Amino acid sequence: MIEVSHIAKIYHSDTRETYAIGDASFTVAKGEFVSIVGPSGCGKSTLLNMVASFMAPSSGTISVNGHRVVPGQIPKGLGYIFQKDTVLPWFTVARNIGLGLKFRGVPEPEIQGKVDRLLAMAGLKDCHDMFPHHLSGGMRQRVALLMTLACDPDILLLDEPFGALDSNTKMVLHKELLDIWQQLGQTIMMVTHDLDEAVTLSDRVIVLSAPPSRVVLDHRVDIARPRDVFSLRQSREFSDHVREIWGVLGREFKQVGKEALEHA
Protein backbone atom coordinates (compact mmCIF):
# COMPACT_ATOMS: atom_id res chain seq x y z
CA MET A 1 0.00 0.00 0.00
CA ILE A 2 2.89 2.39 0.77
CA GLU A 3 6.31 2.29 -0.88
CA VAL A 4 9.02 4.75 0.19
CA SER A 5 12.04 4.56 -2.11
CA HIS A 6 15.31 6.40 -1.36
CA ILE A 7 13.55 9.44 0.07
CA ALA A 8 15.61 12.43 1.16
CA LYS A 9 14.48 15.79 2.50
CA ILE A 10 16.76 18.81 2.69
CA TYR A 11 15.72 22.16 4.16
CA HIS A 12 17.52 25.17 2.68
CA SER A 13 18.27 28.47 4.39
CA ASP A 14 20.47 31.43 3.45
CA THR A 15 23.46 29.95 5.25
CA ARG A 16 23.13 26.17 5.26
CA GLU A 17 21.42 22.98 4.17
CA THR A 18 19.81 20.80 6.82
CA TYR A 19 19.17 17.14 6.10
CA ALA A 20 16.00 16.01 7.83
CA ILE A 21 16.06 12.67 6.01
CA GLY A 22 19.16 11.31 4.31
CA ASP A 23 18.06 8.15 2.49
CA ALA A 24 15.05 6.14 3.67
CA SER A 25 13.40 3.16 1.98
CA PHE A 26 10.69 0.77 3.23
CA THR A 27 7.27 -0.61 2.33
CA VAL A 28 4.00 -1.06 4.23
CA ALA A 29 1.78 -3.94 3.10
CA LYS A 30 -2.00 -3.85 2.92
CA GLY A 31 -3.55 -4.22 6.36
CA GLU A 32 -0.27 -3.77 8.24
CA PHE A 33 0.21 -1.58 11.29
CA VAL A 34 3.69 -0.05 11.08
CA SER A 35 5.21 2.43 13.54
CA ILE A 36 8.12 4.80 12.87
CA VAL A 37 10.39 5.69 15.79
CA GLY A 38 13.65 7.61 16.03
CA PRO A 39 15.38 10.48 17.82
CA SER A 40 14.03 14.02 17.65
CA GLY A 41 14.86 15.76 14.39
CA CYS A 42 15.19 12.58 12.33
CA GLY A 43 12.24 13.50 10.10
CA LYS A 44 9.50 11.15 11.34
CA SER A 45 6.66 13.66 10.90
CA THR A 46 8.30 15.00 7.74
CA LEU A 47 8.17 11.51 6.29
CA LEU A 48 4.49 11.17 7.19
CA ASN A 49 3.74 14.55 5.60
CA MET A 50 5.48 13.52 2.37
CA VAL A 51 3.41 10.31 2.19
CA ALA A 52 0.31 12.49 2.61
CA SER A 53 1.53 14.82 -0.21
CA PHE A 54 1.72 17.82 2.17
CA MET A 55 5.35 18.42 1.13
CA ALA A 56 7.68 17.23 -1.62
CA PRO A 57 10.77 15.09 -1.06
CA SER A 58 14.11 16.49 -2.20
CA SER A 59 14.81 13.18 -3.95
CA GLY A 60 13.34 9.70 -4.19
CA THR A 61 9.76 8.56 -4.74
CA ILE A 62 6.73 7.59 -2.68
CA SER A 63 3.86 5.47 -3.97
CA VAL A 64 0.48 4.88 -2.31
CA ASN A 65 -1.68 2.03 -3.56
CA GLY A 66 0.42 1.76 -6.71
CA HIS A 67 0.29 5.45 -7.63
CA ARG A 68 3.18 7.86 -7.25
CA VAL A 69 2.45 10.61 -4.72
CA VAL A 70 2.33 14.08 -6.26
CA PRO A 71 2.83 17.00 -3.84
CA GLY A 72 -0.46 18.73 -3.14
CA GLN A 73 -2.59 15.85 -4.41
CA ILE A 74 -3.70 13.81 -1.40
CA PRO A 75 -3.75 10.10 -2.31
CA LYS A 76 -7.19 8.58 -2.68
CA GLY A 77 -8.42 6.74 0.38
CA LEU A 78 -5.94 8.31 2.81
CA GLY A 79 -6.83 9.64 6.27
CA TYR A 80 -4.57 11.65 8.59
CA ILE A 81 -4.78 11.97 12.40
CA PHE A 82 -2.74 14.88 13.76
CA GLN A 83 -0.97 15.31 17.10
CA LYS A 84 -3.62 17.77 18.26
CA ASP A 85 -7.27 16.85 17.89
CA THR A 86 -8.98 18.67 15.02
CA VAL A 87 -12.55 18.72 16.30
CA LEU A 88 -14.50 21.95 15.71
CA PRO A 89 -15.63 23.45 19.05
CA TRP A 90 -18.88 24.94 17.69
CA PHE A 91 -20.21 21.58 16.42
CA THR A 92 -21.56 18.69 18.46
CA VAL A 93 -19.73 15.37 18.51
CA ALA A 94 -22.13 13.92 15.93
CA ARG A 95 -21.80 16.90 13.59
CA ASN A 96 -18.01 16.76 13.82
CA ILE A 97 -17.93 13.08 12.92
CA GLY A 98 -20.32 13.53 10.00
CA LEU A 99 -18.65 16.65 8.61
CA GLY A 100 -16.58 14.91 5.92
CA LEU A 101 -19.61 12.97 4.73
CA LYS A 102 -21.64 16.19 4.55
CA PHE A 103 -18.96 17.78 2.34
CA ARG A 104 -19.21 14.73 0.08
CA GLY A 105 -22.96 15.24 -0.32
CA VAL A 106 -24.00 12.08 1.51
CA PRO A 107 -27.72 12.16 2.42
CA GLU A 108 -28.44 13.14 6.02
CA PRO A 109 -30.13 9.84 7.06
CA GLU A 110 -27.10 7.92 5.82
CA ILE A 111 -24.76 10.26 7.70
CA GLN A 112 -26.70 9.79 10.93
CA GLY A 113 -26.69 6.01 10.59
CA LYS A 114 -22.95 5.89 10.04
CA VAL A 115 -22.23 8.35 12.86
CA ASP A 116 -24.32 6.28 15.27
CA ARG A 117 -22.47 3.09 14.31
CA LEU A 118 -19.07 4.74 14.81
CA LEU A 119 -20.07 6.25 18.15
CA ALA A 120 -21.18 2.83 19.37
CA MET A 121 -17.93 1.26 18.12
CA ALA A 122 -15.84 3.77 20.10
CA GLY A 123 -17.96 3.71 23.26
CA LEU A 124 -19.23 7.27 22.74
CA LYS A 125 -22.90 6.69 21.94
CA ASP A 126 -23.97 8.83 24.93
CA CYS A 127 -21.91 11.78 23.63
CA HIS A 128 -23.92 12.31 20.43
CA ASP A 129 -25.15 15.83 21.27
CA MET A 130 -22.26 16.98 23.46
CA PHE A 131 -19.83 19.72 22.49
CA PRO A 132 -16.05 19.18 22.50
CA HIS A 133 -15.46 21.36 25.57
CA HIS A 134 -17.54 18.87 27.58
CA LEU A 135 -15.14 16.02 26.68
CA SER A 136 -11.82 14.87 28.10
CA GLY A 137 -8.69 14.98 25.95
CA GLY A 138 -8.93 11.26 25.28
CA MET A 139 -12.55 11.51 24.23
CA ARG A 140 -11.80 14.39 21.87
CA GLN A 141 -9.02 12.35 20.29
CA ARG A 142 -11.48 9.51 19.80
CA VAL A 143 -13.85 11.91 18.06
CA ALA A 144 -10.98 13.08 15.81
CA LEU A 145 -10.29 9.46 14.88
CA LEU A 146 -13.97 8.84 14.10
CA MET A 147 -14.07 11.98 11.92
CA THR A 148 -11.43 10.34 9.73
CA LEU A 149 -12.90 6.83 9.87
CA ALA A 150 -16.31 8.14 8.76
CA CYS A 151 -14.86 8.75 5.29
CA ASP A 152 -13.76 5.08 4.97
CA PRO A 153 -10.01 5.58 4.45
CA ASP A 154 -7.96 2.61 3.27
CA ILE A 155 -4.83 4.07 4.86
CA LEU A 156 -4.47 5.91 8.18
CA LEU A 157 -1.47 8.12 8.93
CA LEU A 158 -1.13 8.84 12.65
CA ASP A 159 1.24 11.57 13.86
CA GLU A 160 1.71 10.93 17.59
CA PRO A 161 -2.05 10.94 18.17
CA PHE A 162 -1.73 9.98 21.86
CA GLY A 163 1.39 11.97 22.76
CA ALA A 164 -0.39 14.57 24.93
CA LEU A 165 -2.40 12.04 26.95
CA ASP A 166 -1.65 10.42 30.31
CA SER A 167 -0.52 6.81 30.32
CA ASN A 168 -3.85 5.37 31.53
CA THR A 169 -5.87 7.20 28.86
CA LYS A 170 -3.32 6.11 26.26
CA MET A 171 -3.83 2.45 27.09
CA VAL A 172 -7.61 2.76 26.82
CA LEU A 173 -7.25 4.40 23.39
CA HIS A 174 -4.71 1.78 22.32
CA LYS A 175 -7.33 -0.90 23.00
CA GLU A 176 -10.00 1.01 21.12
CA LEU A 177 -7.72 1.73 18.16
CA LEU A 178 -6.78 -1.95 17.88
CA ASP A 179 -10.43 -3.02 18.17
CA ILE A 180 -11.48 -0.60 15.42
CA TRP A 181 -8.51 -1.50 13.21
CA GLN A 182 -9.20 -5.22 13.52
CA GLN A 183 -12.84 -4.61 12.52
CA LEU A 184 -12.15 -2.26 9.61
CA GLY A 185 -8.74 -3.50 8.42
CA GLN A 186 -7.02 -0.27 7.36
CA THR A 187 -3.33 0.01 6.63
CA ILE A 188 -1.79 2.16 9.39
CA MET A 189 1.49 4.07 9.50
CA MET A 190 2.11 5.78 12.84
CA VAL A 191 4.82 8.12 14.11
CA THR A 192 5.51 7.91 17.84
CA HIS A 193 8.14 8.75 20.44
CA ASP A 194 6.81 6.00 22.70
CA LEU A 195 8.55 2.69 22.06
CA ASP A 196 6.19 0.75 24.36
CA GLU A 197 3.26 2.15 22.36
CA ALA A 198 4.89 1.12 19.09
CA VAL A 199 5.45 -2.47 20.23
CA THR A 200 1.98 -2.73 21.76
CA LEU A 201 0.19 -1.71 18.56
CA SER A 202 2.38 -2.63 15.61
CA ASP A 203 3.16 -5.49 13.28
CA ARG A 204 6.50 -3.82 12.51
CA VAL A 205 8.58 -1.06 14.08
CA ILE A 206 10.90 0.91 11.79
CA VAL A 207 13.78 2.76 13.47
CA LEU A 208 15.23 5.86 11.83
CA SER A 209 18.77 6.92 12.62
CA ALA A 210 20.01 10.27 13.83
CA PRO A 211 19.85 12.85 11.00
CA PRO A 212 20.55 12.65 8.15
CA SER A 213 18.29 9.71 8.82
CA ARG A 214 18.09 6.30 7.24
CA VAL A 215 16.36 3.08 8.23
CA VAL A 216 18.62 1.27 10.70
CA LEU A 217 16.14 -1.40 11.83
CA ASP A 218 12.94 -2.91 10.46
CA HIS A 219 11.72 -5.08 13.33
CA ARG A 220 8.79 -7.48 13.12
CA VAL A 221 6.68 -7.70 16.28
CA ASP A 222 5.51 -11.30 16.19
CA ILE A 223 3.14 -11.08 19.16
CA ALA A 224 -0.14 -12.87 18.47
CA ARG A 225 -3.32 -10.88 17.92
CA PRO A 226 -5.74 -9.94 19.36
CA ARG A 227 -3.54 -8.29 22.01
CA ASP A 228 -4.59 -7.38 25.53
CA VAL A 229 -2.93 -3.98 25.90
CA PHE A 230 -3.43 -4.01 29.68
CA SER A 231 -1.51 -7.23 30.35
CA LEU A 232 0.80 -7.34 27.33
CA ARG A 233 3.49 -5.13 28.87
CA GLN A 234 3.98 -7.61 31.70
CA SER A 235 4.92 -10.41 29.29
CA ARG A 236 8.41 -11.67 28.53
CA GLU A 237 7.89 -11.44 24.76
CA PHE A 238 6.93 -7.76 25.02
CA SER A 239 10.08 -7.02 27.03
CA ASP A 240 12.21 -8.93 24.54
CA HIS A 241 10.91 -6.87 21.61
CA VAL A 242 11.40 -3.57 23.46
CA ARG A 243 14.92 -4.57 24.48
CA GLU A 244 15.92 -5.55 20.95
CA ILE A 245 14.59 -2.34 19.39
CA TRP A 246 16.07 -0.15 22.14
CA GLY A 247 19.47 -1.72 21.49
CA VAL A 248 19.42 0.08 18.14
CA LEU A 249 17.28 3.11 19.01
CA GLY A 250 19.31 3.94 22.12
CA ARG A 251 22.51 4.23 20.07
CA GLU A 252 20.81 6.78 17.82
CA PHE A 253 19.71 8.86 20.82
CA LYS A 254 23.28 8.80 22.10
CA GLN A 255 24.53 9.97 18.72
CA VAL A 256 22.14 12.93 18.75
CA GLY A 257 23.28 13.85 22.27
CA LYS A 258 26.94 13.60 21.28
CA GLU A 259 26.45 15.85 18.27
CA ALA A 260 24.54 18.37 20.39
CA LEU A 261 27.45 18.59 22.85
CA GLU A 262 29.96 19.01 20.02
CA HIS A 263 28.00 21.97 18.62
CA ALA A 264 27.28 23.58 22.02
Image (cartoon, grey):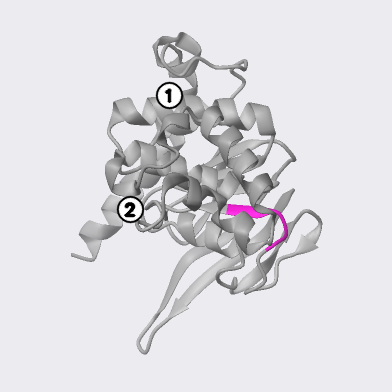
Residue 32 sits above or below residue 46 on the image: above
Residue 185 placed where, x, y %? 69, 34
- Secondary structure beneath dot 1 equals helix
Q: Quadrant of residue 105?
A: bottom right
User: Magenta includes 142?
Assistant: no
Q: Is residue 201 left or right of residue 59?
A: left
Please, what is the three-letter code of the amino acid marked with disc 2? Answer: Val
Residue 194 placed where, x, y %? 38, 37
Q: Main secondary structure of the magenta part?
A: loop
**Which residue is label 2 attached to?**
256
Q: Give whichever of 43, 251 is nearer the camera.
A: 43
* Residue occupying the far front of the picture: 109
Q: Quadrant of residue 24?
A: bottom right
Residue 136 placed where, x, y %? 29, 38
**Which residue is label 1 attached to?**
243
Q: Give whichever of 138, 27 is nearer the camera.
A: 138
* Residue occupying the far bottom of the picture: 14
- Secondary structure beneath dot 2 equals helix
Determine the residue positioned at 68% across, 46% down: 110
Please, what is the three-letter code of the amino acid marked with disc 1? Answer: Arg
Q: Give whichever of 91, 258 is nearer the camera.
A: 91
* Residue occupying the far right of the picture: 66
Q: Is residue 216 left or right of residue 111?
A: left
Q: Which mark is residue 51?
A: none
Determine the residue positioned at 62% across, 21% down: 222
Q: What are the residue bounds of the magenta stretch?
A: 75-79
